[in-house]
Image (cartoon, rainbow, N blue to C red):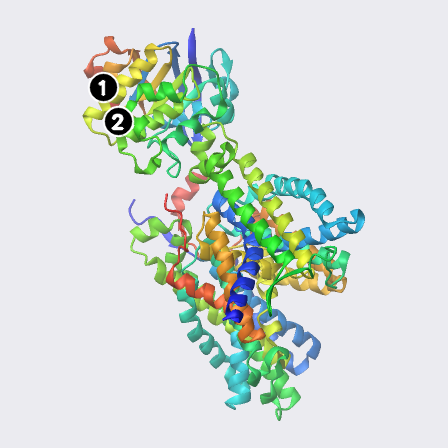
Amino acid sequence: MDLLSTRKLDAYYGDSQVLFGVDFEIERGEIAALVGANGAGKSTLLKTVCGLLRAPREAVRFAGEPIGGLAPGRIVRRGIALVPEGRRLFPSLSAEENLMMGGYVKRAGPWKLDSVYRLFPRLQQRRAHPAASLSGGEQQMVAIGRALMSNPQLLICDELSLGLAPVVVKEIYQALEQVCRDGVTAVIVEQDVAVAQRVSRRLYCMQEGRITLHGLSSELTRERISRAYFGV
Amino acid sequence: MTAAFTVSRATRASRIGGAVAAVLVLWLSTFPWWADPGWMREFEEMSCYLIFALMWNLLAGYGGMVSIGQQAFVGLGGYALLVLGNHLHVNPFLAVPLAMVATLALAVPVSFIAFRLQGGYFAIGTWVIAEVFRISIANISTVGGGSGTSLTALRGISRSTREAATFWLCLAGATAAVAAVYGFLRSREGLALLALRDSETAAESQGVDVTRTKRAVYLIAAAGAGLAGALYFLGNLRISPDAAFTVNWSAFAIFIVVVGGVGTLEGTLVGVALFYLLNKLFSDYGTWYLVGLGLLAVVVTLKFPAGLWGFVSRRFDLHFFPVHRRLIPPERDRACAT
Amino acid sequence: MLSFLDTLVQGVLLGGLYALFALGQSLLFGVMRLTNTAHGDFIILSAFVAWSLAVVTGSPWLALIVLLPLAFAGGYLLQRLVLNGTIGKDPMRSLVVTFGLAIVIQNVLQQIYTADPRSIDSGGLNTATFQLAEGFSIGALPLLIFAAALALTVGLQLLFDRTDLGRAFRAVSDDREAAELMGLDHRHVYALATGIAFLVVAFAGTLHGMKTTVSATDGPSLLLYAFEAVIIGGMGSFYGTLVGGMLLGVTQDIGFRIDPGWGIWTGHVVFLGALLLRPSGLFPRTR
């Protein structure tokens, strides 16, 4: 059974439509990747799922219940956490305080400060530093840790690799795969198609607000993906 | 297909409006020969509020600089008139434009202090500056100290000459203020200002000098407030620091602009008219009248942010003073579109 | 020498009162960048309500105890029902709404309490003094006010730095949308901040009303003092606000002693000078 699904989801910025009948599904325990050019609607889809943009109630279902258009706070309480594009840490809060903010909703589960520090040992030494003074990779770790602190069933990661060195990207994705082995389901948005295909089990390609291709990552050829990606 | 669109700023309403305004000004200018002095006095007061509110709207509504301290320049204009007339023996009517220039000159150094602050801090910081001027003048006994003084320069001028000249000056000042704000908004600098209002960063990247543009607006608004002050106290014959630098000037301007419609010229005109009516009908109720004005400003801001005029103009697409350029599609396209 | 010391001490004590005026505004600046132009009027409003409660209960302290929950509820509801709708990038809406409220409060107070100044009966506390030397004494009430300002400053700073609520305040201030994603409701968080700010306002109003006479139209000058203390101290630090209040108090007191007509003027001018020299205040938020 699907953990998250959208059915004919439309979304708008003001008067202009940016998503057109998007059908998106992810099963419990898998990693799904969402690829597409800038402006294809990936972030919009994530924002709609997280409640930052309005949607009809039935158009988004999570764990069997309709959640479209609920306030972001209520969606977090149901178990969806977002690692937003650009990380969006609280710059004046320390690394640890950022993590604690993630635990604001106090959902039960395995993720606490210790378990985040076990996942990202580097953060333990940097716990008292203001988030703004951390390196890009450390900030991304805080952002993932902060999302995990709400003990989500579904972790949504928007552009984890943005602005990071390849070696750091690798470290971060290894951590993510470990998290998912422990039972968290994940959606990743990724510019780097090779990375997306390697990490995910299922892959969706978006273009101009529509899903143009989807299937099991292992069965899709690079040629089909780039055709769906660039529309050529 | 090329050059099929034309750019237009005029609307039918604006052409009619221009003609009506011209006739209205001509008609008003005959007042001194036949109208009741009481009406003239009321008109003079309202033109001072109009000038001041227009300038406040330019500063806050278009320039994004919400100030609660523009009364500083009303007071400076009034006291400049007093010093020029009483102490330097300049003809008091000639002293009005000179007082405006003096206010403008004083506003230059003031702007360097005020521009240290932004947003809400700017609003209250400018109020502090106005208080500094008020207390300074209240402590200078040659201009009457705390209790103020009379405009003795007007002695020896016959009552009818004085009333007529004051009236014409007010009419000219109000007309000039409307024309100046309208002209400014349609100029290159005005376009820069409108761009600034939408996004400072974007405007800056397009080559708009943000501080320069804002300072220009601030100085124009200060000069206008100085003119309003000089005119007001010319008609009032008497000036005191408490009356000249009272925050009520800002309060009334905020009411007029917000209730009329922020960021439109028509809104300020509508606002002044409404303010006049409410004042006429309810000012006898004293404190309750002021409570009503305050509540009205709050409710309009929360529920009708575009103000009275914004509501009307959106409903009927009316623009008497259009400052925007609009694209007019060629005839053929227009036929297809509809 | 003694008179210099006297000026300094009286100025610092006066500064305690100004800090008390300013702390609530400092909190609102810190959490939501809100400039409440009715801040002074809310202090005066609490002074009058405390006056009425003191008449009923017979004690200014009982009045304060009754006033505190009312103030918190009033602040919470004001934010929730009115001010939350005005917060945004454009400062116009919040400035106009609070300015409108200021006019409403001033005139309603004048209608109810007339224009006469009045003072809360402190049971003789306002005249009690400690004689330290010949011609140098400290008033008991100013000392108490200073102690209250100090305690509230430390309390607010600890609340801000060390508690879950303080962390939520800072998070919402840093990035409102990201805080929403953590499950915070910014409208509720803002309203709690205003509720707490109004607790400080209730203290300030009651103590101010005990120390001196208040009248319905005093609010704007209190707003200006509060604002000056916040800016001199640097936005986002309560300790800065306390120091800013004390500097303002000392400056005004020096001015008053030179010429009573120029006391407040001196405070304003030193504020403007500080603005030119240190536009971000003495203790800017560096984190």
Residue annotated with mark 2: A161
- Res A84 visible: yes
**Direction top: furthest residue:** A1
Which quadrant of the rendered structure holds the N terminus of chain B?
A: top left
Query: What residue does disc 1 label?
Result: A195
In this image, A46 relative to B276: left or right?
Answer: left
Q: Subunit of mark 2?
A: A
Residue B259, visible in the rendered structure:
no
Circle 1 marks a residue in which chain? A
User: Is A106 rendered above or below residue B61?
Assistant: above
Query: Type of residue at label 2?
Result: Ser
Amino acid identity at mark 1: Val
Residue that sits furthest to the bottom in the current view: B156
Residue B136 x, y percent position in the rendering = 53, 75
Which element type, helix, strand or loop, lies under badge 1?
helix
x%, y% of residue C241?
Answer: 49, 52
Return the residue nearer the eye: C209 or C219: C209
Q: Position of residue B289 (x, y in %)?
A: 72, 59
